[in-house]
């Protein structure tokens, strides 16, 4: 097996394995705050492991949407291997953690549909609705569900780069290691606190 890995894709695998070891050692233990969504914007949120082709593709797609439509969209990201139960709850027992916190903000329908979702990435959309009394959180699910949502948005699908990212599968070598910088909402919050 190791000979097989060293031929063909072995170098890519070795680089990815080394990068994963580094990322695990520097893993985030607590999610950054989610500030209120500005009126008239939708926030695309993606959480997951810092080295995953599905997380990488979701992040790249979210960044492209925000770059093409900055007046309508912003992003919020959190990457962790789940240290201290920050994603799924303490020791995976389902108590606490970012997944359950976010799911509790969703409609009953989304909560039921996403009850069993425990893989990465986990994607959702936040927006403000004054008549609803604040933030509305729409659960999407994994990268495939995020892509389905993008596919349902004609304005987004009219862009060839977005369309390509939303309609093709991730490519390990291109998507496993990705830009892990904060989303636009986190950057704006950091500037405001300077």
Image (cartoon, rainbow, N blue to C red):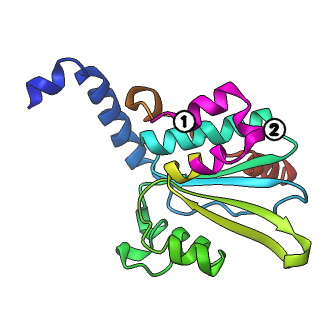
Do residues under tags 1 and 2 come within 8 Å of each other at their CB atoms? no
Q: For mark 2, what is the residue?
A: 69
As drawn, 63 above or below 24: above
Graded by Cα atoms within 10 Å as few (under 14), some (14 to 19) or many (20 or more), the crowding at tag 1 reads some
Foreground disc of the pair 1, 2: 1
Percent position (x, y) of residue 160?
A: 67, 25
Secondary structure at numbered mark 2: loop
Which portion, as a residue range, is magenta? 148-169
Q: Mark 1 points at which residue?
A: 167
Q: Is residue 162 magenta?
A: yes
User: Taking 27 as reference, is 151 left or right?
Assistant: right
Q: What element carries label 1?
A: helix
Is residue 14 placed above or below 65 in the rendered structure? above
Residue shown at the point (47%, 33%) measured from the top left: 175
Residue 117: x percent and y percent? Answer: 44, 66
The quadrant holding residue 167 is top right
């Amino acid at each position: 097996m190791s000979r097989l890995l060293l031929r063909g894709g072995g170098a890519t695998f070795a680089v990815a394995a080394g990068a994963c070891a580094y990322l695990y050692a520097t893993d985030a233990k607590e999610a950054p705050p989610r500030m209120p969504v500005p009126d008239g914007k939708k926030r695309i949120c993606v959480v997951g492991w810092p080295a995953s082709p599905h997380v990488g593709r979701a992040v790249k797609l979210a960044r492209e949407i925000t770059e093409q439509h900055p007046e309508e969209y912003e992003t919020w990201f959190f990457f962790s291997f789940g240290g201290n139960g920050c994603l799924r709850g303490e020791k995976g027992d389902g108590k606490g953690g970012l997944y359950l916190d976010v799911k509790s903000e969703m409609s009953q329908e989304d909560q039921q549909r996403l009850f069993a979702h425990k893989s990465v990435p986990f994607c959702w959309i936040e927006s403000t609705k004054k008549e609803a009394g604040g933030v509305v959180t729409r659960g999407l699910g994994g990268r495939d569900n995020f892509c389905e949502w993008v596919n349902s948005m004609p304005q987004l699908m009219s862009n060839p780069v977005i369309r390509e990212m939303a309609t093709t599968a991730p490519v390990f070598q291109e998507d496993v290691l990705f830009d892990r910088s904060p989303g636009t909402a986190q950057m704006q919050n950091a500037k405001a606190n300077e």
